[in-house]
Amino acid sequence: AASLPTRSPGTNADLFARAQAAIPGGVNSPVRAFRSVGGTPRFLVSARGPYVTDAEGREYVDLVAGWGPAILGHADPRVIEAVTDAARRGLSFGSSTPAETELAELVEQRVAPVEQLRLVSTGTEATMSAIRLARGFTGRDLLVKFAGHYHGHSDGLLAEAGSGLATFALPGSAGVPADIAALTLVLPYNDLDAVRAAFADHGDRIAAVIVEAAAANMGVVPPLPGFNRALVDLAHAHGALVISDEVLTGFRVSKAGWWGVERGTDGEYTPDLLTFGKVIGGGMPVAALGGRADIMQQLAPVGPVYQAGTLSGNPVAVAAGVATLRAADAAVYAHLDAAAATISSAVSDALAAEGVAHAVQRAGNLFSFVFGDGVASGVTDYAGVQRQEGWRYAPFFHAMLDAGVSLPPSVYEAWFVTAAHDDAAIGRIVEALPAAARAAASA
Ligand code: PMP
C-alpha cells in the first residue's frame, strides 16, 4: 500500500505563511486568497461527497464544489475508478485516443448546436480559441462582451470582467496592450438597446458577441427571457457570430446546460459556438469549444485557424469527463435542483428572520444572494450587483465557515451544490444559518 505522510501538514495559518513566501499571494488563482472576506484560507487535503477536509482535520460542508465541476460530489467512486484505470495505462500519449471521440460524442448528443467539438485544457483556452475562430471565420476584429461576465484571463476578455476582477473591483488588468483592449466593446448585460446600438455603430466590424449563457461570475444574474435569442438574431442580422460561454453552466444546470434550460421555450436559440469547462472534465483539466461544423472546420489541421495543445484530450482527464457525463443522469439534475431550492430558500428565510433585505438570484441550480433594500427585487446587470450592501457577505461567510460550511469566498460568485448534498449535509448548512444571518444583520 502507498504510504501517506504521517506528519501533520501544519495549521492553515502556517501553510498560508509558507505559501505566501513561495507563491504570489499564496494562491494559484486570486479569489482563493480570501482577500475580499478577510481571514486565512483553508488548505484542503481531501474531499468526499459534499464535504472537504482541511489540513487541521476540520471537515466542512462544501458549497464551492471545485468551482463547479463536482456535480456528482467529490471523489465519486465511478470517476475515481475511471481515472485510476486510465492512469495505469499511461498519463499522456500526445496522440489520439478512443475516449476523446467518446467525450465529443457525449457532448454532441446532449447539446444539438454542437456539431463538432475540440478539446482543450482550461475554460480560458476554450474562449480564447473560440474568439480566434470567430475572427478567422468572419474576417472581422471586434468582440462584444458584457460587463460583469467572466470568460477567463486571455488579453481581450479582462475588460470589466466578473469573478476575481469583480471581487477586487479591477476595471481590467495591467499588461493588456491598449490596442488589444480597444478591440473589445463592453456593454451592459440584459440591455438589448445597447446591443442594437453597438451593431448600428460597428456592425460590419463585429466578429462575435461572447456571452455567459447565464451570468454567474458576478454572483448569479440570469438572462432576461428572450435575451439570448434576441442576441443571436441581432448578431446574425449583421453577419456576426454568437459564442455562448457555458464553461460554468454546461452540464451543470441541465444535461444540455443553459441552452437546454431555454430549449423548447419562446427563448430557444442556436449559438454558433459554445465553450465548456468545469463539469466536462469532472474535476480534471478538460475544456472544449464546439459548434457549427462549417465554423469548426476552419480549425487546423483542416482550416487556417491555428489551435493546439500538448495536453489537449489528455487521457486521464478525459476519463474523468466521460465518467462524469455518463453518470450525470436525470436523477442527478433533479437532485441538484432540489438541493439548490432547499438551500437557497433556507438562506433567504434566515436572512429575512433577521431583517436583512436581500434577493435570491437564481439560474437553474446556480444561485447567489444580493444584500440591501436597493436590490431586494433582484438585479439584472453588473451595475445592479454593485449597488448591493456587499459588506454584509464577509461576516456571513465567516460565521458559516466557523460552523463548518465552506461558501465561495466572495459575494461575486455563485454557490454550487452537488448530487451528494444529502439531508445530513443540508441539515448542517441550515443549522449554521441563524448565526450567520445575525452576523450579516449587524454588519
Ligand atoms: N468562462 C466562464 C463562464 C467561467 O466561469 C470561467 C471560470 N470560472 C472561465 C470561462 C475560465 O475557465 P478557466 O478558469 O478554466 O480558465
Image (tube, rainbow, N blue to C red):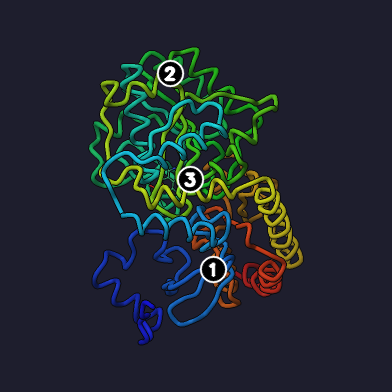
At label 1, the amino acid type is Arg
Residue drawn 34% across the image and 47% down it:
314
Marking on residue 175:
none
Q: Position of residue 220 (x, y in %)?
A: 58, 47
Is label 2 in a helix, a strand or a loop? loop
- Report the residue marked by disc 3: 280
Q: Residues within 10 Å of mark 2 (few under 14, many from 20)?
A: many
Q: Nearer the viewer, mark 2 or mark 3?
A: 3
Q: Earlier in the sequence, mark 3 or mark 1?
A: 1
At label 2, the amino acid type is Ala
> CA gap, disc 3 to disc 1?
19 Å
- Report the residue marked by disc 1: 48
> CA gap, disc 2 to disc 1?
44 Å
Residue drawn 45% across the image and 63% down it:
36
**Dividing the picture into quarters, in which one does residue 427 lie?**
bottom right
> CA gap, disc 2 to disc 3?
27 Å
Is label 1 in a helix, a strand or a loop? strand
Residue drawn 61% across the image and 57% down it:
417
- Report the residue marked by disc 2: 240
The residue closer to the viewer here, 386 or 153, is 153
The residue closer to the viewer here, 167 or 155, is 155
Q: Is residue 5 above or below residue 346?
A: below
